[in-house]
Image: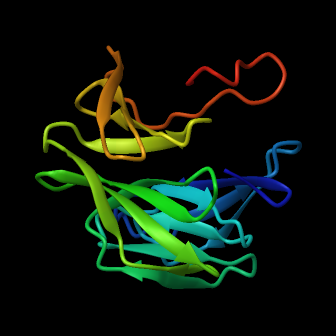
Amino acid sequence: AWWGEGLAAASSSSGLGNGLDGVFMVDVGTGATALVGQGIPGANFVTVTPWGTLIVSDPRVDELQELTADGTVTTWLPDLLSPNGTAFTADRSALWSVTTYADPQPVWRIPVVDGVAGTPVEVAAFGAGDVSDGVAVGASGALYVVQNIGGRIDRVSQDGSVELVAEGVPWGASIAFGEGEGFDPCSLY
């Protein structure tokens, strides 16, 4: 995710203990990297908040972390089952979060007031064989979810209804709508 002057990238060495777990900032002009968020061993997905921090998920840990610009890591939301892809709703009043390792795999809408997480509401759920991973929010406010093992992309509407968007996306992990010159803003990449 673009954060400040660089690209924030989640990095997980899957418990190897090599000190490379957390969030790295990448200067896309020079290629320089710096570890700015340590203490998140399975950092997997980053989302920029409306208040300027990052929400970081680790699907092996049942909580969402928050990372500030000075590198401070705190628990933003405890007791959220295996969170992975996260994205704010179009009006920024709530955070979507999908579950990876569970049966079933809930899709959560977490209300947010003044940067504080409210009680998560289950909106929909997928089966254990799907392995929900990356997400993106469309112009309509719907959540698009790539199913890693399921090999497809689903759309979850605000009312919780689920619709198949694409099949044949094996091991999909991240998705985004097009941004910038040459990329279609109505297409998922």
**Residue 158 relative to residue 61: left or right:** right
Residues 131 and 113: in front is 113
* Corner quadrant of residue 46: bottom right
Look at 14% across and 38% down and name the residue there. Answer: 129
Q: Is residue 96 visible?
A: yes
Furthest-front residue in this view: 159
Relative to 94, is 118 above or below? below
Relative to 17, is 150 above or below? above
Q: Is residue 21 visible?
A: no
Relative to 140, is 74 above or below? below
**Residue 28 relative to residue 38: left or right:** right
Image coords of residue 15 (percent x, y): 34, 65
Give the number of callouts: 0
Image coords of residue 106 (percent x, y): 24, 55
Look at 51% across and 65% down and name the residue there. Answer: 56
Q: Quadrant of the C terminus?
A: top right
Look at 63% across and 60% down and name the residue there. Answer: 92
Q: How is the image coloured?
A: rainbow
Residues 98 and 60: in front is 98
Image coords of residue 138 (percent x, y): 57, 36
Relative to 67, is 6 above or below? above
Look at 13% across and 44% down and name the residue there. Answer: 128
**Residue 68 relative to residue 146: left or right:** right
